[in-house]
Image (cartoon, rainbow, N blue to C red):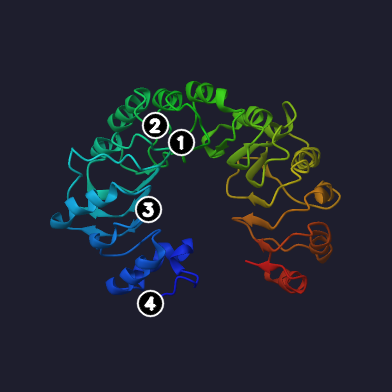
Amino acid sequence: MALSAAETNPLEIPEIRMMVGQYLNRPDLAQCLRVCKSCLSENSASTQTLQNLSSLVLVGVKIELEDSANFWDQCTRLELLSITFTRIAQLPDSSLTFGRFSRLVLVMNPMQRPIEQHLVWMVRCPNLNSLSWRDGIASRTSMHAFANHQASGACPNLCELDLSLLYPPDTQLCQIIKGMRQVKTLTIDECRFGPLSFAALRPHFSEKLDIDANSTTSQMVPEVLASCSHLEWFFMRRVMSQDIIQGRPWVCTHSMTFLQLNIIIPPGQDVDHHQRQVLERIALLTNLENFFLDHKFNIEGGTLLGLQLGKGLELLTTLKRIRQFALLNHTQQFTEHKVEWMIDNWTSLRFVQGLSQENRATLEAAGIGLL
């Protein structure tokens, strides 16, 4: 398999890049690497082909002891390294530094080493600005060490941080955030900000900031939406309707492009009134391109937000840029009138998820795919 430099290289496509190792053998990969010089995913790594790369993605790779030293030596030339489900027999020699690294991704105990040992060579990446470190077995000791590492200023340029599955406690997350001069992206999936870490994040609200909002409590939502003027992406698994309705005006109405919410109307509230007020707020997001309503979580006696004409849906005529709409964890048959309303008013709509098969013909006739 040989590719012309003038042709589109499949390794430039992220989905293929992540799966290419399942379909290409080592000689094929070597041919691709001579052209692509970007990212690689393979089941058996050949360290001889790394010298011209600036970025490397390893998924399910095993690097033996005799190849480890050469592998790490070649990595000193990289700007991006992503290691997922990968076994590397030996850590890098203490004499090596990785001054060109700007982005590092470590997923699910990469290198099959105790997680504390990751820090041993992470501190040798002084120009790192993006770190995605996702591992479900990190101890509190590990997080304490990483928090101290951040507080020492070892990575002064770090501004994008993903600590999914690491569950840092509030005090350590606060220390980590304070060690970041700028925060552009912060993702701590399945973990919640406490008062200390949320306070440490406040000085960054005016920056171009994306927060995994699932990490916030529902009571923090009004402040985030009223303070983060460059917020583009907002995701919240459980948010009470009053926390959408209440508070100061949102300042992210022109910046937000992605919204996924599981909105719960508490028992004892006027459901129709709350639904309309919530949708009035959402209608302000005029640049929204992805709108997902999740129906996974509820509370006893609560009501999940619905979309009904005459009860607030008609307010969303302002959302002219929506390309994807989804009802998650719930399948619903919309009336023909409601489907036609979506087609007429959401003129950029291309994909819909969560509607029943009975709605397929109407959607497809308008060029809209039902997922």
Dot in front, 1 or 4: 4
Residue 71 spot, x, y in % from top left? 23, 53
Query: Which residue is tagged 4?
Result: 2
The image's mark for residue 191 is 1
The residue at the far right in this view is 310
Residue 178 spot, x, y in % from top left? 45, 23
Q: Secondary structure at mark 2?
A: loop
Dot in front, 2 or 3: 3
Number of marks in picture: 4
In the displayed structure image, the side of residue 217 where residue 319 appears, left or right? right
Which residue is depicted at the point 76% across and 38% down? 281
Q: Secondary structure at mark 4?
A: loop
The answer for how far apart the CA atoms under marks 2 and 1 are is 8 Å
Q: Which amino acid, mark 2?
A: Pro
Q: Earlier in the sequence, mark 2 or mark 3?
A: 3
The reply to whether discs 2 and 1 touch (Cβ–Cβ < 8 Å) is yes
Q: Residues within 10 Å of mark 2 (few under 14, many from 20)?
A: many
Q: Earlier in the sequence, mark 3 or mark 1?
A: 3
Q: Earlier in the sequence, mark 2 or mark 1?
A: 2
Residue 365 spot, x, y in % from top left? 77, 74
The residue at the far bottom in this view is 1
The answer for how far apart the CA atoms under marks 2 and 3 are is 31 Å
In the displayed structure image, the side of residue 294 where residue 310 appears, left or right? right
Comparing 39 with 371, the one in front is 39
Q: Which amino acid, mark 4?
A: Ala
Q: Earlier in the sequence, mark 3 or mark 4?
A: 4
The answer for how far apart the CA atoms under marks 3 and 4 are is 21 Å
Query: Which residue is tagged 2?
Result: 168
